[in-house]
Image: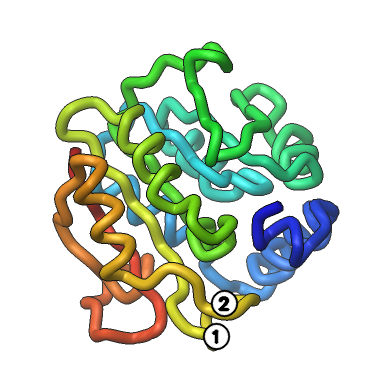
C-alpha cells in the first residue's frame, strides 16, 4: 500500500474535486500546472498525466489542444475524471507496475507530468522504479515534469523523497535535469519546500 492509500483509503475523489472547485469559484487559478506544461511543448503534443487524479490538469491540457492520456490508481479519483470528461482516455493502473503496452497505450509521449505530490505519496523505495517506467514512455528529447513538496508544510504526510534522491533516480533512468522552479508559475527555485523539476530524456 502506498502513502496515498494509507492517507485516504482510496475514497477521496469527490472531496478532492470539491476542494478545487471551491478554489476556482473563489477566483483562484487552478490551471497553473497545465499552463506550465503548455509552455514546454506545443499544442498537439502527446502528454501523459501520471497520477492524474480527478483529471483537472489533463482536462485543461486537452482543452488547449494536447493529446492526453491519464493514469491513476485511485478509482474514486478516476470516477470523477470520467464523469467530467468521458471522451478522454483514463486508465486505472499502479505507477509502480505501469506497463503501457498492456493497457494499449502507445509509449511515445512528448511530456509526462507528475503533479499533486505523487512522488512523496508513493510507497517508500518505489520512486526509482516509477521514474524509470515514466522515463521509458518518453520519446527521445521528451520531458518529465514533476512537482512535489519537500517539507511538512507542503505535504499531507511526513516528507518522503528529497531532491538529490529524485535527481539520482532520474539520472539512473537516463534523464538529465533541464530546470527547476519553486512553483508552477515558474518562479525561480530558492531552496524552499516545494519544487517543480524538468528532466529531459
The crowd level at tag 1 (other Cα within 10 Å; few <14, some 14-19, many 20+) is: few
The crowd level at tag 2 (other Cα within 10 Å; few <14, some 14-19, many 20+) is: some
Along the line of sight, which residue is nearer the eye, 44 or 27? 44
Q: Is residue 79 left or right of residue 110?
A: right
Along the line of sight, which residue is nearer the eye, 102 or 187? 102
Q: Give the residue at mark 2.
A: 155
Q: In this view, does 23 lie to the left or right of 195?
A: right
Q: Which mark, by number, is residue 42?
A: none
Q: Residue at x 64, y 76 (%)?
A: 156
The vertical placement of 12 against 50, above or below, is below
Q: Residue at x 27, y 85 (%)?
A: 191
Q: Which residue is drawn at 17% across and 61% down?
A: 179
- Kindly indicate the quadrant of the structure image that contains residue 121: bottom right
Q: How far apart are marks 2 and 1 (CA)?
A: 5 Å
The vertical placement of 79 against 122, above or below, is above
Q: Give the residue at mark 1.
A: 152
> Hey, which residue is sitting farthest front in the picture?
125
Q: Are marks 2 and 1 in contact (CB under 8 Å)?
A: yes
Q: Position of residue 197 (x, y in %)?
A: 29, 61
Q: Is residue 59 left or right of residue 108?
A: right
Q: Where is residue 82 in the image (x, y as percent from the top left)?
A: 73, 33
Q: Residue at x 58, y 44 (%)?
A: 52
Q: Position of residue 56 (x, y in %)?
A: 60, 49
Secondary structure, mark 2, is: loop
Amino acid at each position: 500500500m502506498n502513502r496515498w492509500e494509507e492517507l485516504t483509503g482510496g475514497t477521496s475523489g469527490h472531496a478532492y474535486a470539491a476542494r478545487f472547485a471551491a478554489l476556482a469559484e473563489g477566483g483562484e487559478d487552478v490551471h497553473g500546472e497545465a499552463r506550465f506544461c503548455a509552455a514546454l511543448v506545443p499544442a498537439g503534443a502527446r502528454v501523459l498525466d501520471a497520477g492524474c487524479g480527478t483529471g483537472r490538469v489533463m482536462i485543461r491540457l486537452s482543452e488547449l489542444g494536447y493529446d492526453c492520456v491519464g493514469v491513476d490508481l485511485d478509482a474514486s479519483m478516476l470516477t470523477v475524471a470520467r464523469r467530467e470528461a468521458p471522451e478522454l482516455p483514463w486508465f486505472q493502473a499502479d505507477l509502480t507496475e505501469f506497463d503501457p503496452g498492456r493497457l494499449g497505450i502507445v509509449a511515445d509521449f512528448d511530456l509526462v507530468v507528475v503533479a499533486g505530490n505523487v512522488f512523496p505519496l508513493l510507497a517508500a523505495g518505489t520512486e526509482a522504479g516509477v521514474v524509470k517506467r515514466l522515463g521509458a514512455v518518453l520519446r527521445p528529447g521528451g520531458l518529465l515534469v514533476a512537482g512535489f513538496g519537500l517539507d511538512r508544510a507542503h505535504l499531507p504526510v511526513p516528507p518522503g523523497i528529497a531532491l538529490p534522491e529524485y535527481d539520482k533516480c532520474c539520472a539512473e533512468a537516463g534523464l538529465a535535469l533541464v530546470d527547476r522552479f519553486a512553483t508552477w508559475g515558474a518562479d525561480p527555485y530558492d531552496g524552499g519546500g516545494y519544487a517543480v523539476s524538468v528532466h529531459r530524456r
